[in-house]
Image (cartoon, rainbow, N blue to C red):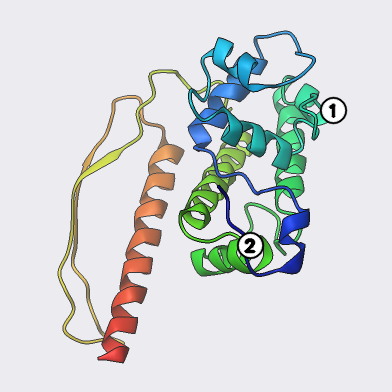
Amino acid sequence: MIEHQGHPDAYLRPHPPYVAFKTLDEFLQRVRREDVPAKIHAGLLKRWGIAAGNESALITALKALGLIDTNGRPTEAFLEVRLSAPRRLAALRRAAGHAYPDLGVEIGAPIDDDQLHDYFVARRGLRGQMVQKAMRFYRHLEQALGRESRGDELADRPAHFEAPTVSTFATAPATSVSAGETLQLSLVVQLPTNVAEQELADFITGVYRAWRQARGQHVRTQQRA
């Protein structure tokens, strides 16, 4: 169950997307190969083998993005994500605007994790794990739109693609917080042979964001000590 708190309008808005982004990716690839269904429902997703056991979360995301209406019927945006890359990109950008109507910035514009967290808590009424899930979806959507705009099409990514993985991650604890503080970061990254330059760049960006968040927690701990 999704729990709400905070902004009084939170109950009146569609829930923001929180499904695993790869599930939406699989759905978008599938709809390009299928005839347009009269309605998107759990039974159809089961037949397609998408979102097994989590069909409701995908349907929630599709409604939030405006790809289907409240009754599950495909919208104009749904039809456009099946078209050429420029039309698909335009439709996905409109879908992002539909999902985050009062974020204050267009998706892809700079927004740090603290601002994003506060948006989902204060404006959308989420809490607990739902906040983190919504934030992860947003960041993945942000990256996907960036790839689309550079011509690295989301739906055309090889099915055997493997993202870079970290096998070792360690930071040396800092004994103080000062302008000259240095934190040691050690990474051992396993790279698949088919990794794209932008995928690696996105991965490194994610590592930096995780480090920055960890450092912020360290600073707050030192300040309380």
Dividing the picture into quadrants, the one containing residue 215 is bottom left
Residue 191 image position (x, y, % from top left): 27, 34
Q: In the rendered image of this protein, does residue 151 appear above or below residue 13?
A: above
- Is residue 152 visible to the viewer in this orientation of the structure? no
**Sequence order check: which comes first, mark 1 or mark 2?**
1
- Is residue 66 visible to the viewer in this orientation of the structure? yes
Which residue is nearer to you in this view: 201 or 23? 23
| Mark 1 or 2: the one toward you | 2
Residue identified by numbered label 2: 125
Q: Quadrant of the C terminus?
A: bottom left
| Mark drawn on residue 138 | none
Residue 201 as seen in the image, left or right of residue 40: left
The residue sitting at 61% across, 44% down in the picture is 17
Q: In the rendered image of this protein, does residue 150 appear above or below residue 131?
A: above
Residue 123 image position (x, y, % from top left): 68, 65
* Kind of residue at disc 2: Gly
The residue sitting at 56% across, 44% down in the picture is 18
Residue 2 as seen in the image, left or right of residue 190: right
Residue identified by numbered label 1: 76
